[in-house]
Image: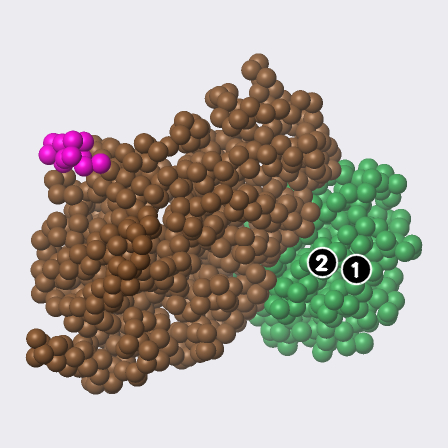
Chain colours: A green, B brown
Amino acid sequence: MSHLGILEPGSRHDLRVGISPDAPDEGQLPDEGEGAFGYAHSYETASRYDGPGLRVVLFLSGCLLRCSYCHNPDTWHLKDGTYISAQQVIDRLAGFAPALRALNGGLTISGGEPMVQLAFTRRILAAAKQMGLHAAIETSGYLGDRVDDKYLENLDLVLLDIKSSDPQTYRAVTGRDLDPTLRFAERLAAMGKPVWVRFTLVPGFTDDPANVEGIARFVAPMKNVEWVEVQPFHQLGAFKWKAMKLEYKHVDTPTPTPDLIERVFEQFQNAGCNVR
Amino acid sequence: MEGSVGLKERQQKDCWRDFKAGDWRRAIDVRDFIIRNVSPYSGDESFLVGSTARTKAVWAKLQPYFEAERKKGVLDVDAKSPSNLLAHDAGYIDRDNEVIVGLQTDQPFKRAIFPYGGLRMVETGLKAAGFEPDPLVHEAFTKYRKSHNDGVFDAYTPEIMKCRKAAIITGLPDAYGRGRIIGDYRRVALYGIDRLCEAKRAERAQIDDMWPTDEIIRSREELAEQMRALDDLAEMAKRYDCDIARPAANAQEAVQWTYLAYLGAIKEANGAAMSIGRVSSFLDIYIERDLREGALDEAGAQELWDQLVQKLRIVRFLRTPDYDALFSGDPYWATECVGGMGLNGDTLVTRSSYRMLHTLTNLGPAPEPNMTVLWSKSLPESFKHYCIRVSRETSSLQYENDDLMRPFWGDDYGIACCVSAMRLGKQMQFFGARVNLAKALLYAINGGRDEVSGEQVAPPALPVNGEYLDYDDVVAKFDATMEWLARTYVHAMNCIHYMHDKYFYERLEFALHDRDMLRTMAFGIAGLSVVADSLAAIKYGKIRIVRDDRGLAVDYVNESEAPVPQFGNNDDRVDSIAAGLVTSFMNMLRKHPTYRNAVHTQSVLTITSNVVYGKATGNTPDGRRKGEPFGPGANPMHGRDSHGWLASCLSVAKLPYRDSQDGISYTVSVAPQKAHLSDAELISEAAKAFDMYFGAGGFHMNLNVIDKETLEDAMANPDKYPQLTIRVSGYAVNFIRLTREQQQDVISRTFHGQV
Ligand code: SF4
């Protein structure tokens, strides 16, 4: 049992490691309980990037992927997060709710991977909906099979990271299988759940024209996909890899050139996606 | 006799032609005139035009002065003639092209001296600027004439002297002009000097029958001084060929008369802050009339504003190095308020509100005049959007909550300095700088001894004895220290303003007030977030004391693992401590009677003095290091508001205005964040964010919009930007700590435009 902590202070930019040493392994999916407690990395207010309007973004700990360019490797393990109560999160959120409503925004749960802590996020999302907030999660979709339709009812939007359309590339970049993500995307499409697809453009890794083409073709027919957002790779998370003594593959990876970004945009556009 | 009265009436009628009549004709009531005659404007800025050739010519003449001043500092001083309305001949920049005339002395950028405030300040200032003090002035103000400064020090007690020296009560106006008094300069344009004198004579006649108590005698003398000042002002105006005995007859005269009145004020007093008030929508009434009559076109209207602002940008006072350390950048706070709503529900935004802000585009951004937007949820949307555009381009606007102030001060108040609201012509304040609350907390822990010098400053009390700080114990001791501080502070302020009224009375500014005005005594606190965070650290952490060989607590170590709440994160556990401090210190101040029965008020404002206060203050229990600057005003300590501006501004919005009626200052710097929004959407989202913050009770917002040029400059000169924080896709980073490549990346990312 971890020591009950407080979600204060610090931003997503702060490195957090080994805060809850007794936490279970994220692979053990410790979410079948009530969800009264969970592990969080940090939160931010005033994001205009992670969904419509102004948003509070809650970054949870725990992820089963190991993306080679991940800019928050200190969110991979539950033990690196702070053990907090859902009630505390909900109370904090309530303090922002009037402002978020006034600015047509809401809550986005990101990570890490929100679906690692299903019961915990279910609770928080339900509370957010009760406050009249727009609710979203940002997910890789890898654990999509685990959520029931009821879970999705409390979501107004899914920010779905599709890192690659090619199973080999996906495995090389994330260490996991692509299939679950595609299945999840199709399920969301079938139920008409609004989705923004996010694609991280990493030169030399995910920029292959065929890879981009594959995502574009997969996504284009889906009417629920409102946007495809291209996120150019950056080095701002590199310091965390160094501090955690992890082997970082992207020391020499450049940020995408304007030309490359332009090409990728065109690929999505030509396939019929709303890209930005 | 009959004939001249008839002439005067005809003249007045002519000057007031086409204005809607009302009470303002029978009594001095500028507000009534405005409400009856103003033309609210809810359109956009598309009507605005650039500067005229004349304006550009004057501006070109001034550039070499600005440049020389940047290099050399003070360019010139008249060390011989103590300033007053008639001390200097008329002066010009470029006589043929000046539409609005009048300088503080006979030359632009030649500063004047004000020895009535205190000779020492004058002589120190002169020497620091490389000029010789004048022996005659020295003789006059040592042998024959006492100054405000001399008077105050005759009345100060040893305890007050100690507090001053220890920098627990600082910045007091005991050696220079107190400022923060706004004459209703518009009265001169609307009524002319003759009519104003008549009103003053009537005010005087009413009290001639009253028994001469101290207050009545003082009032009589003051009214006599005021009438003399009005005569002198008319004489000064004559030197510029302006007959201000009568009302202004057109827009040019209205701007000119108003400016001459303001100019008179800055010739008579060197107050720390010399606001101009709220002139834009008043003067707009004259401009609208001239436009109707075909006597003026838009270029001519803008020219009046541009040229008025040029004059307001070259106001200069001689200050000392100490003063400059407190308030860097030679400020004088010629604050002008634009916008706001009338009590009748109509907006007070006029085309001239736009024209005033547009001077920032025509003449380039500048801190003076200190443009203050009175924000209301009900302002026309297009005006809100225009203000935000101007902010984004110039970072030169501050915003204050009209919806919060209107119930207190009506719809014709101005802002003195940065955040002090006062009804124009009907209210003044006794300015009182601020006390260092963080130091007071350390005194409480150390039994009244100064944590730096070790000297006993506050009365000896039991210091904290144990190894750890106990919340209840510290709060009890801190309360006692604050009680002592409040008493000493009110005491000092009473001495100061008694002497200021006596030796350095602002006769012209008060001539442009009603006789029976509301007086407030404006106290202030610095270090609020440091104290709130310290108390929260003591309550939620485990703070061990480190003592030196004098037995003084000089450092604090938090041994608790748990993070402690910090002000600026919308966390009630600490925000309520901050709000409670504001209320409790205010109530302590209220216990002590004030000079002239002034109403106690308080501000949470430091301007740039947060650096100096920080320098003088030892380590604090919140982990702030000795010498580290405080957060400015009501700002959270830098970097501790780690969850973004929303959390930060909601914390500040919780501080209670009713217990801080002299204002709560909050500065926020934002870089345009990457967002998938069009420009128009971004602007309208920002307007909604303002509505949200002010709706939540926020009082003030000093908005810095960090632009690409700033970031590029920060790359080249990192030393200039130690605290520049920027946000990129949800990341907050200290800009200068990034590598060069990352900086470039951030710039291209942030300013990528809207894909
Ligand atoms: S899914 Fe997200 S959090 Fe998990 S490793 Fe990949 S980038 Fe990092």
> Could you say where residue B149 lies in the image, as x and y percent from the top left?
29, 36
Where B217 sits versus B698, above or below? Answer: above
For marks 1 and 2, give the one nearer the viewer.
2
Q: Position of residue B548 (x, y in %)?
A: 58, 17
| Side of A152 relative to B56 (left or right) | right
Crowdedness near tag 1: few (<14), some (14–19) or many (≥20) residues, C-alpha within 10 Å: many
Q: What is the residue that sits farthest to the top in this orientation?
A: B549
The reply to whether the magenta stretch includes residue B141 is yes
Query: Between residues B615 and B729, which one lies in front from this camera angle?
Result: B615
Which residue is nearer to you in this view: A247 or B743? B743
Kindly identify the amino acid type of the residue bearing the numbered disc 2: Leu
Q: Earlier in the sequence, mark 1 or mark 2?
A: 2
Quarter residue B515 falls in: bottom left
Give the residue number, with chain letter if any, for mark 1: A124
Which residue occupies the extreme right position in the image?
A: A33
Image coordinates for residue B312, horizontal then vertical, percent: 25, 57
Label 1 residue SS: helix
- For label 2, the residue is A93
